[in-house]
Image (tube, grey):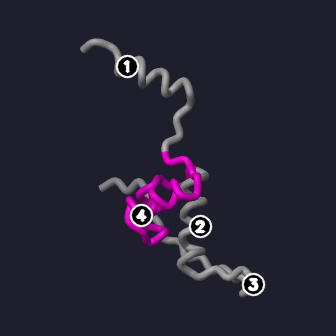
Amino acid sequence: MLTLWRINMRLTLEVPDAANVSQTDAQILFAMKLFETDKLPLGKAAEVAGLSYRAFYELLVRYGIPVVTMTEEDVKWEIGNALKPR
């Protein structure tokens, strides 16, 4: 069996009370950053966040984090291929 992703790290953070961040919020924010920086794919980041794929996706959209990262050239290529006769 091939394992592409393995998450087995335990992380402990000391966050000042003034930050007013719950453990759940910190976990979600961490997962969002891991996804945003291409450290984890969406599904695995959702697992880290403790959310469903869809809920995590919607959260990324709400915070303006691009879920699909295509360059202008990628979009042109996709459109060109979609318009080719089959």
Q: Which mark is residue 18?
A: 3
| x 57%, y 75%: residue | 25
Q: Which mark is residue 55?
A: 4
The image position of residue 22, as x and y in percent, is 59, 82
Residue type highlighted by circle 4: Ala
Residue type highlighted by circle 2: Phe
Which mark is first along the chain, 2 or 4?
Answer: 2
The image position of residue 49, as x and y in percent, is 48, 69
Closer to viewer: mark 1 or mark 4 = 4
Towards the viewer: 35 or 64: 64
Quadrant of the image occupied by residue 82: top left
Towards the viewer: 41 or 56: 56
| x 46%, y 21%: residue | 77
Identify the magenta region. 38-67
| x 39%, y 60%: residue | 53
* Label 1 CA crowd tier, 10 Å (few <14, some 14–19, many 20+): few
Magenta span has 43?
A: yes
Q: Which residue is mark 1?
A: 81
Secondary structure beneath label 1: helix
Which mark is first along the chain, 1 or 3?
Answer: 3
* Label 3 CA crowd tier, 10 Å (few <14, some 14–19, many 20+): few
CA gap, disc 3 and disc 1? 53 Å
Q: Which residue is mark 2?
A: 30
Residue 56 lies left or right of residue 20; in this view the side is: left
CA gap, disc 4 and disc 2? 15 Å
* Label 2 CA crowd tier, 10 Å (few <14, some 14–19, many 20+): some
| x 42%, y 69%: residue | 51
